[in-house]
Image: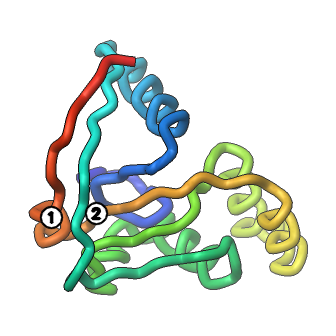
Amino acid sequence: MNARPLDFGKGFYLTENCEQAKSWAIKKADRFGNQPIITKYEIYLNNLRLKEFKYTDEEWLNFVCGCRKDINICLEKEYDIIIGAVADDTIFRLVTFYEEGTYDLEYTLKQLKINPTYNQLCVCSNEGIARLKYIDSESV
């Protein structure tokens, strides 16, 4: 599990977007000097404690800000899986300006609607990890 603050706190992050997955793999591999690899999984969500953010709205924004301050937030909320938009570099800066008070809530929410987002799924419990089924992997 990750030790640094991320959008949804500690967890194993996945995405359905292949380009996003490639980007994540390349960044991680560059950081550690490894070959980037994408690993594909199926996940069975039934009977898990889910938190799904359908929109980049005030609830999503406050959750992401909370996770950036406390990496254990999804554990405290007792979720197995958290699903929602990725705060990519553009969104990350927007959230930072909101946290610092440079942007107010209204302006931040308006900008969130303008910027395209990709999805992410954060598996943050052993129960969630147990539901992952390995399918395949490939070098990028």
Q: Of the residues shown, which amino acid type is indicated by label 2?
A: Val
Residue 84's spot in the image, x, y percent? 52, 67
94 with respect to 136 (left or right): right
Residue 56's disc is none
**Residue mark closest to the camera, 1 vs 2:** 1
Q: Distance between the Cα atoms at labels 1 and 2? A: 10 Å
Q: Of the residues shown, which amino acid type is indicated by label 1?
A: Arg
55 with respect to 110 (left or right): left
Q: Going 62% across and 47% down the picture, which residue do you hit? A: 88
Q: Are marks 1 and 2 in contact (CB under 8 Å)?
A: yes
Q: Going 39% across and 64% down the picture, which residue do you hit? A: 9
Q: Would you name the residue on which mark 1 appears?
A: 131
Q: Earlier in the sequence, mark 1 or mark 2?
A: 2
Is residue 76 at least partly visible in the picture?
Answer: no
Q: Is 21 or 108 nearer to us in this picture? A: 21
Residue 11's spot in the image, x, y percent? 29, 59
Q: Would you name the residue on which mark 2 appears?
A: 123
Q: Going 54% across and 34% down the picture, which residue do you hit? A: 19
Give the structural element (helix, strand or loop) at label 1.
Answer: loop
